[in-house]
Amino acid sequence: MSENIGHEKRWLILGIMSLSLVIVMLNNVTLNVALPEMSKDLQADNSDLQWIVDSYALIFGGMLLVMGALGDRFGRKRALQLGLILLGAASAAAAFYADSSNDVILARAAMGFGAALVMPATLSIVIVVFPREERGKAIGIWTMMAGIGAPIGLLVGGWAVENYDWQMVFLINVPIILLALILGLVFVPNSKDSKKTPLDPMGAFLSVAALGTVLYAIIEAPTLGWTSPEILTISALAIIMTYLFVNWERKVEYPMLPIGFFKFKGFSLGLIAIMLASFVMFSFMFTQMLHFQLVRGHTALEAAVRFLPLPLGLMPAAANSDRLSTKFGSNNVISVGLVLMTIAMAIFTTVEIDSEYIRLACIFLLLGFGMGLTLAPATTVVMDSVPSNKAGVGSATNDASREVGGALGIAIGGSVLNEYYQRNMIIPEGLDLGAVPLESFPAAMQIGAEMLENGNMLGADLIENAQLAFMEGMIASATVMGIIAMLNAILVKLYMPRKIINMSIEEE
């Protein structure tokens, strides 16, 4: 296969990679809508539920760099196939055999391990099978599928729970994974580092330790408190592990992730743009699921359907971003995308409890359009800065920036929302303050509903006050997201090169 020509079935291969990618992305969020049912069926407490969600994210994010490096060394197709098998087996085991929260946590951890093999492999295979002049278009489509994976996950999860049970959230993975496995086995070529670069075991260990502690601190901080002794200790450990990893990669002869990549502004600023755009997207999606269900009274499926304008905006923007980047420059397209995200957040600050859904739909559409113009060209910039023999590691670094950004968005966005909710929450006069947990909006809503069922009309006041306080918190969170998007836009516009020369770092 000539790099100038590309693989003859490259567009079919892109479709298979897109399917595999969607499997990974939807599993990031699908289970969230099934948590209430799981808590009843498995007698799971809040800590169990949190770990059911977080075990996937922690293992997935922590193992990305290592799995990307192994794919480069031993074959990206093998990594893809093994990851899909792990995802399918763990999903089936959870659906048929899990009867405790610990069973589900273990299954989710195994799924995270499989996802860490799959996601870097998908992008690195796309890079290898497409010629340079078509890579921007291909990466745009790959990014589009990554972006719509989360909204699809919410729809699938909502449909499964409303029509079947929580086991269906896992079971629905199996036939899709089997299809991806068979298509990949038949059509996807294997590729790997032709130079057979030696592995970097110490770098692998340090990368897992660094990413794992960073993600753990981010995920646990809203629950334990950002200044709690445990979070401060883990954060210090994360900084130490990151320093040791960087220091090791600088001096080792065959580094897993050459630190020299970060000297190139395209690579570094591309990763920052991806991380902060993911911060905004995941934070907004997190707050809007609560908004639609607890403020507007929609079911999980009805709430998920209302997210559809986001992928409808993201898809055309991502798919056509390569042409825009060629004409106007990557930095200009990315910064415009980030400005559109800022505008979407600014409009959202005008939303009230009784605002029509059409306003929210326009915000989602605008946010999706901005996401598409940001993520696709930023991913292209990152991958154009990496030599083909390091495509797996480059893809994994790109994916890790998404994961860290998304985790930060949910943690910080949720913390801002919670802080402003507590500040603005007013307990109705005559209601015992001790009966209402100020820190929990869902609990306040549940207590209010129970009071109304028992004929206590103070429940209506409690619900109204909680909803108003939540809206204040949600607007404060959106303000933070808008500021971050705007600062990101300025950074990209001023410092990212207008045009990235493909393969800034040539293979030696």
Image (cartoon, rainbow, N blue to C red):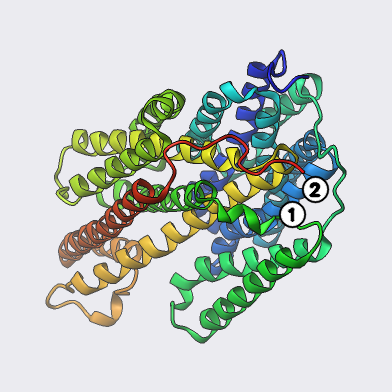
Residue, far bottom: 229
Q: Residue at x 36, y 60 (%)?
A: 413
For the N terminus, the image quarter is top right
Report if residue 301 is visible in the image.
Answer: no
In screen coordinates, is 500 left or right of 122?
Answer: left
Report if residue 275 is visible in the image.
Answer: yes
Q: Which residue is mark 1?
A: 66
Q: On the image, which quarter does residue 321 sit in?
A: top left
- Secondary structure, mark 1, is helix
Amino acid type of the residue tagged 1 in the rendering: Val
Residue, far top: 8
Q: Residue at x 46, y 36 (%)?
A: 499
- Secondary structure, mark 2, is helix
In screen coordinates, is 229 left or right of 290?
Answer: right
Density class for disc 2 (Cα within 10 Å; few <14, some 14-19, many ≥20) is: many
Q: Position of residue 64 (x, y in %)?
A: 67, 52
Q: CA distance from mark 2 to mark 1?
A: 6 Å
Q: Which residue is mark 2?
A: 70
Q: Position of residue 411 (x, y in %)?
A: 43, 63
